[in-house]
Image (tube, rainbow, N blue to C red):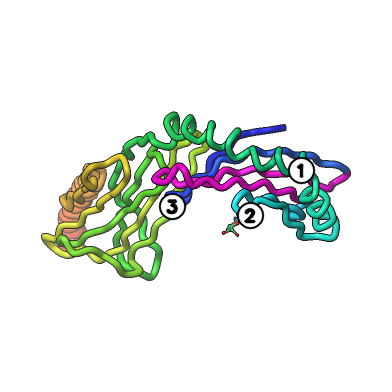
Amino acid sequence: MSSLQYYVSGVIFASTLLGVGAFNGYYEYYTATCHFNPNHLSDVEFIVTSWFNKDPYIRFNSTVGEFVGYTALGVKNAERFNKDPAVMAKWRGVKDRYCKINIPLEYNAILSKTVEPEVMLSMGRPPSGGHPAMLMCSAYNFYPKMIRVKWYRDDQEVTTGDVISTEELADGDWYYQMHSHLAFTPKAGEKISCSVEHASLKEPKELVWDSSMPEPERNKIAIGAAGLVLGLIVTAAGFIYYRTKARGRILVPSG
Ligand SMILES: *[C@@H]1O[C@H](CO)[C@@H](O)[C@H](O)[C@H]1NC(C)=O
């Protein structure tokens, strides 16, 4: 089995070739990885590691140019491989044959691409016991993974623990999403905004919270007010009815 994967962390990219064998509950596999930085495409490091369950037992590192063993078996094989010119010629050539050919292809096809996040600002339910209000700033369908979400209250960045953000969550289709929460106590006339920085954007994307009430809230208040007025009318009518009735009852025996 072999598959190709890409890991993006900071500016170091790695593409991995994976081989797997599983027998009787044991799991043996190897990973072959090209580590590179897109700004220095000539600095490529090729690493191939053999694993048993979760432990590496032998590794070839192109920078070192030799195998290194981590278990008795690994050490024995490393000695054997390092002495064998045919094996060494094969592994020392992989960096040029595999990494140098694939990296520009992967880079141009995928890693150099960016997709702008769709950003949304919404009201959320705050955690109990803290601030009475919470805003959520969500970024959807962006690529690559690195993104930064900041909050501003009256143009002052919020750096306190009132901000809680998720990690960048992989959608499983190359795109990512991320959510950041700001718990706060509303102040009259205050401007709250969320700002998103991403490789796809020349300028940070800024969304300003409209503190005027959102539609559903307004409707709820209107329905509540109508109910209150109706309740007052019924109560008043009942009270007037009671008073007339009561007066009538008093009138009868005295009459
Ligand atoms: C490969 O070897 C170099 C030189 O010793 C080292 O700096 C690098 O971290 C090694 N890479 C891995 C993935 O072990």
Give the residue displayed 31% in from the left and 69% down from the top: 160
- Residue at the extreme left: 189
Picture residue at 25% right of the left edge, 53% below the top: 194
Q: Which residues are magenta?
A: 24-51
Amino acid, disc 3: Gly
Q: Is residue 183 above or below residue 240?
A: below
Q: Which residue is mark 2?
A: 64
Give percent across and percent down for residue 191.
15, 57
Which mark, by number, is residue 10?
A: 3
Question: Residues under labels 3 and 2: Cα distance?
Answer: 24 Å
Q: Is residue 84 visible?
A: yes
Q: Earlier in the sequence, mark 3 or mark 1?
A: 3
The x, y position of residue 101, in whole percent, is 53, 31
Q: Which class describes the residues within 10 Å of circle 2: few (<14), some (14-19), or many (20+)?
A: few
Q: Is mark 2 within 8 Å of ligand 1?
A: yes
Question: Overall secondary structure of the magenta stretch?
Answer: strand
SS at circle 2? loop
Ligand 1 position by quadrant: bottom right
Report the side of 189 relative to 197 (left or right): left
Magenta-drawn stretch contains 124: no
Marks 3 and 2 in Cβ contact (< 8 Å): no
Q: Which quadrant would residue 219 be assigned to in this image? A: top left
Q: Is residue 28 magenta?
A: yes
Give the class, few, some or many, for how many residues have Cα within 10 Å of label 3's Cα (few <14, many ≥20).
few
Position of the C terminus, as image quadrant, is: bottom left
User: Relative to 117, does residue 155 appear above or below in the rendering?
Assistant: below
**Closer to the N terminus: mark 2 or mark 1?**
2
Picture quadrant where residue 135 is located: bottom left
* Mark 2 vs mark 1, CA separation in Å: 16 Å
Asked which quadrant contains residue 157, the reply is bottom left
- The residue wearing badge 1 is 85
